[in-house]
Image (cartoon, rainbow, N blue to C red):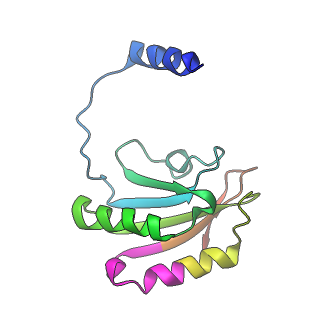
């Protein structure tokens, strides 16, 4: 039932070169985004594996679970910046107001004090990423 995944891994291994990526993200960045398969934050921001940590959930919400992940990333993995990226045509029902509420909540948390936090929305039909003021 998952043979397509194993076949894909076999194709990947044909050109794979081992690397020594650190578990600490090179850009000291964590991205909270939606689980929607159309959203690829590394590609959208021009990043490479190892540049950022990516936390996904329905609607890219800064939920209690996302905050737990961010706390570990900040405390143990050197994260200094957090990008929260929503997207258009989200089936979770998350809105721009939800993004603004999440950013305000995150900015007020002791665990995120001193961390740069920014919000973005990506248009899934054009891949244009717009910062939220």
Quadrant of the rendering where the C terminus is positioned: bottom right
Q: Residue at x 32, y 60 (%)?
A: 28
Report whether residue 79 is seen.
Answer: no
Residue 4 quadrant: top right
Q: Where is residue 102 in the image (x, y as percent from the top left)?
A: 55, 77
Report whether residue 101 is seen.
Answer: yes
Residue 116 quadrant: bottom left
> Vertically, is 2 above or below 129?
above
Q: Which of 27 and 87 is in front in this view?
A: 87
> Vertically, is 122 above or below 13?
below
Q: Residue at x 57, y 67 (%)?
A: 61
Residue 98 quadrant: bottom right
Q: Is residue 85 left or right of residue 80?
A: right
Q: Does the magenta stretch include residue 81?
A: no
Q: Residue at x 29, y 67 (%)?
A: 74
Tally the numbered discs.
0
Q: Position of residue 38 (x, y in %)?
A: 66, 45
Q: Where is residue 64 in the image (x, y as percent from the top left)?
A: 46, 71
Quadrant of the rendering where the N terminus is positioned: top right
Magenta stretch in the rendered image:
103-117
Q: Residue furthest front?
A: 1
Q: Is residue 114 magenta?
A: yes
Q: Where is residue 59 in the image (x, y as percent from the top left)?
A: 63, 62
Q: In this view, does 113 lie to the left or right of 75?
A: right
Q: Which residue is drawn at 31% across and 61% down?
A: 73
């Amino acid at each position: 039932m998952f043979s397509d995944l194993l076949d894909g891994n076999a194709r990947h291994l044909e050109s794979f070169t081992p690397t020594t990526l650190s578990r600490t993200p090179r850009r000291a960045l964590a991205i909270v985004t939606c689980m929607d398969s159309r959203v690829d934050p590394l590609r959208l921001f021009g990043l490479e594996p190892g540049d950022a940590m990516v936390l996904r959930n329905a609607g890219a919400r800064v939920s209690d679970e996302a905050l737990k992940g961010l706390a570990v990333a900040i405390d143990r993995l050197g994260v200094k910046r957090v990008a929260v990226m929503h997207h258009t045509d989200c089936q979770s029902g998350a809105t721009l107001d939800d993004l603004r509420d999440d950013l305000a909540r995150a900015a007020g948390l002791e665990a995120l004090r001193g961390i740069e936090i920014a919000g973005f929305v990506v248009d899934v039909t054009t891949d244009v990423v717009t910062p939220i003021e």
